[in-house]
Amino acid sequence: MIMAAMTTGLCACTEKMERTEVIEAQQIFTHTTRISDVMNAPAFGDYGRLIFPVNEGYWSGETLEDLRLVWYNYIDPDKTVEICNYLKAHADSVFLDIYTEAEKQDDPQKRNTGLFFFRGNPGALFAVCNAGGAFAYVGAMHDSFPHALELSKLGYNAFALIYRPDDAYEDLARAITYIHDHADELGVSTSGYSLWGGSAGARMAAVLGNANYLYQLTGREDIPQASAVIMQYTGYSTVSPQDAATYACVGTSDGIAPWRTMQRRLQSLSALGIPTEFHAYDRLPHGFGLGTGTVTEGWLTDAVRFWEENR
């Protein structure tokens, strides 16, 4: 009798746990979902904490619609909710470790890295999107996740990199190497890729888009140079004949990355025979991301056209 009761109790408990797991899997995030509930969602496991900046002093808000990121404007709550639900729907395959467990044990900060993979068509080109954050934090929810999601909708394979602010270039080099070495299993083309970034992330894209820096940072001669670099709002001014074709956009009211600095750099690249395209948007401030609801809306499609023309 006692054993039968215990068995019945265990079965009931197991069934309840299974029902709870099914309910959690079916639930969707909304504007009023707490950010902490997204980060701690069982579907994400340990990487849930990387969806929002690990440097907590640079973001605020309790719910998805309340999210604020330092130095960023025009954060779109609808897009934030869409991204979180996309990540949950693909939770079993969306996150990729770029460092081994041994490497992370040797340097625990490497646990704060990884690639979020927004899948496009099998065998299609890939892009790596790098969020800004002044090399203090990674503002992915506004400055790389949205870009990667939209690129995947267009059929491209897009990766959003979560990097260590103090070792950003090393982490991007590792990410490019990882994608190249796992291209078959990821289902991506190894040539014709592009590097995207805003603010600090744009600097990362420009540096790794340079053929010499790519070789120096990866130590690999078999990895091709990016066919295009897509940059938003950055003061990066270094110019080299080894730089990739470059598309850049910025607002004229950007107090962090002066638009004329970006314009002069692209003029210098063009003088070297490197394909360029530059857009300055009237009275727009720093950190506009996709630019939804602003004069920049649709710029990403324009940048994709530039990428395709130069691959």
Image (cartoon, grey):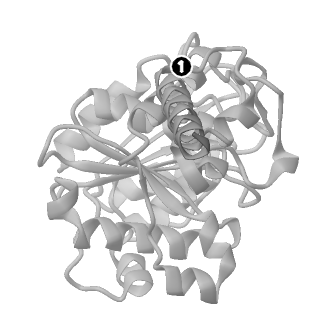
Which residue in the protein does label 1 denote?
28
Looking at this rendering, what residue extends furthest in the right direction?
57
Name which quarter of the figure residue 46 lies in: bottom right
For the residue pair 234 and 6, the one nearer the viewer reads as 6
The residue sitting at 53% across, 19% down in the picture is 28
Residue 243 percent across, percent down from the top left:
37, 65
Q: Is residue 279 visible?
A: no
Residue 45 percent across, percent down from the top left:
56, 51
For the residue pair 63 and 208, the one nearer the viewer reads as 63
Q: Is residue 20 visible?
A: yes
Q: Amino acid at mark 1?
A: Ile
The residue sitting at 68% across, 65% down in the picture is 165
Residue 126, compared with residue 243, is above or below; it is above
Residue 284, compared with residue 128, is above or below; it is above
Q: Residues within 10 Å of mark 1 (few under 14, many from 20)?
A: some
Residue 164 percent across, percent down from the top left:
64, 67
Secondary structure of residue under mark 1: loop
Looking at this rendering, what residue extends furthest in the top direction?
293
Residue 133 percent across, percent down from the top left:
71, 50
